[in-house]
Amino acid sequence: MKTKTLKKNKINVVTLGCSKNIFDSEVMMAQLTANKFDVEHEAQQDDSEIVIINTCGFIDNAKQESIDTIMRYADAKSEGLVEKVYVTGCLSERYKDDLIKEIPEVDAFFGTRELPRLMKTLKADYKKELVGERLLTTPSHYAYFKIAEGCDRPCSFCAIPLMRGKHVSTPIEDLVSQAKDLAAKGVKELMLIAQDLTYYGLDLYKKRALADLLDKLAQVEGIEWIKLHYAFPAGFPMDVLDMMNKHDNICKYLDIPLQHGSTSMLKAMRRGITREKTEALIAEMREKVPGIAIRTTLISGYPGETEEDFQEMYDFVERSRFDRLGIFTYSHEENTHAYDFEDDVPEEVKRERADRVMELQSGISYELNQEKIGRTYKVLFDRIEGDYFIGRTEHDSPDVDNEVLVKMTDDTFVRLGDFADVTITSADHYDLYGQLV
């Protein structure tokens, strides 16, 4: 029996997982809005007639969060608090048959490329003329900007190709058009995302065309920062670095997941690169683009990882002094190449190794931040929290990197979404404190 009145035609879209899922939810929300639905993203009030959950299926923790969220809304449906529950995204793509059996309360499951079918289920039109249109869920001054879908890499641990399919690049002219539309709406920062940025263009232009795309995007009026996320180290197109030097609005920032620092582990992971070649690549990047901030992610506890392998990775991190670093514990994923191997590193050892790397990185981050004291940076302000205006430098992306905190006073004021010059006055491990110039 219903305990409350639900708003007809109101849809609550819940997004789990990475920035690529956020992008997909924004595209879906634009289609729903064009069909006269009242759409909210992660609504505060539970008064929506329909809930659509965009799931993540990447690793165990993400899968569990997705399942917990589905169960929450399945229970809400049973209690009459929701009329319809639909599930889309990576978990649904990968485990649809199992989920249908296990959670029958869900009205329908959809894969990662089934938005037209989802719209049809809602008795709505999939409007082809809206391709590229989005309803932003981020603050209005920045947007995630997906340039390709899927992945052709053979990494042994990764299930993304199973969920997202083969690599498909979006044509340059379409992306430039989308960037112009976003700039017209007030977006100043584009964070380029894909499963693998560096593969961009190989399917369309028979060559790596990320540099060509950057050259065009950098000329879009109103776009002041462009950041690169999720580059692959093997075969990295060095002409991308030339574009960083050519255009001031291409940030000296690169998110390049390296996954390990041991050559034997990189070989087992089928990464197509050695530690030695990785170190040479990082050195060349820093030489070609002085001051570049490099963010990476690593995996601890891959099958067969010995203490010697781990020590090689630890020493690699100590030498490399990455600006930003995250580390995951290995997740044993069905239907991946690595699933054939024994998951032989105990969970507590995976966690302990990850903690050791993060403790090391924390010290490196603190030392690098101390070097910033007294320097002045261009800062983009995102939000107010407590007594502080909170922003980021060109070397920082939202949610994952350092933040710059400026104390609110009677004579200190910045508009959110604006840039301002800030002199850093103090710093800790992951935050910078400063004063407006």
Image: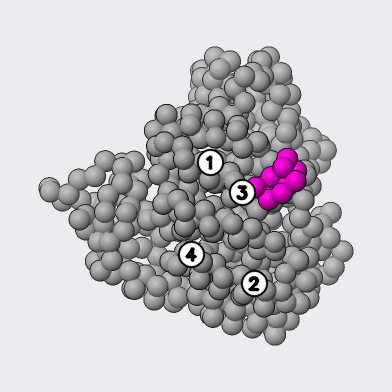
> Circle 2 — which element?
helix
Q: Amino acid at mark 2?
A: Thr
Is 227 situated above or below 137?
Answer: below
343 or 304: nearer the viewer:
304
Q: Is residue 189 above or below residue 26?
A: below
Q: Residue at x 12, y 48 (%)?
A: 410
Q: Nearer the viewer, mark 1 or mark 2?
A: 1
- Circle 2 residue: 278
192 on left or right of 290:
right
* N-term-proximal mark, 4 vs 2: 2
Q: Nearer the viewer, mark 3 or mark 2?
A: 3
First along the sequence among labels 3 and 1: 3
Residue 331 disc label:
none
Count of marks, rendered view: 4
Q: Is residue 35 left or right of residue 195?
A: left
Q: Residue furthest right?
A: 340
Mark in front: 4 vs 2? 4
Residue ID for mark 3: 210
For image coordinates 27% across by 61% down, the residue present is: 376
Q: Say which amino acid is labelled 4.
A: Val
Residue carrying label 4: 289
First in sequence: mark 4 vs mark 1: 1
For disc 1, the neighbor class at 10 Å (few under 14, some 14 to 19, many from 20) is: some
Question: Would you name the residue on which mark 1 appears?
Answer: 216
Alpha carbon distance from label 1 to label 2: 29 Å
- Please give the range of residues in magenta: 201-209
CA–CA distance between discs 4 and 1? 20 Å
Secondary structure found at label 3: helix
Which mark is first along the chain, 4 or 3?
3
Q: CA distance from mark 3 to mark 1?
A: 10 Å
The amino acid type of the residue labelled 3 equals Leu
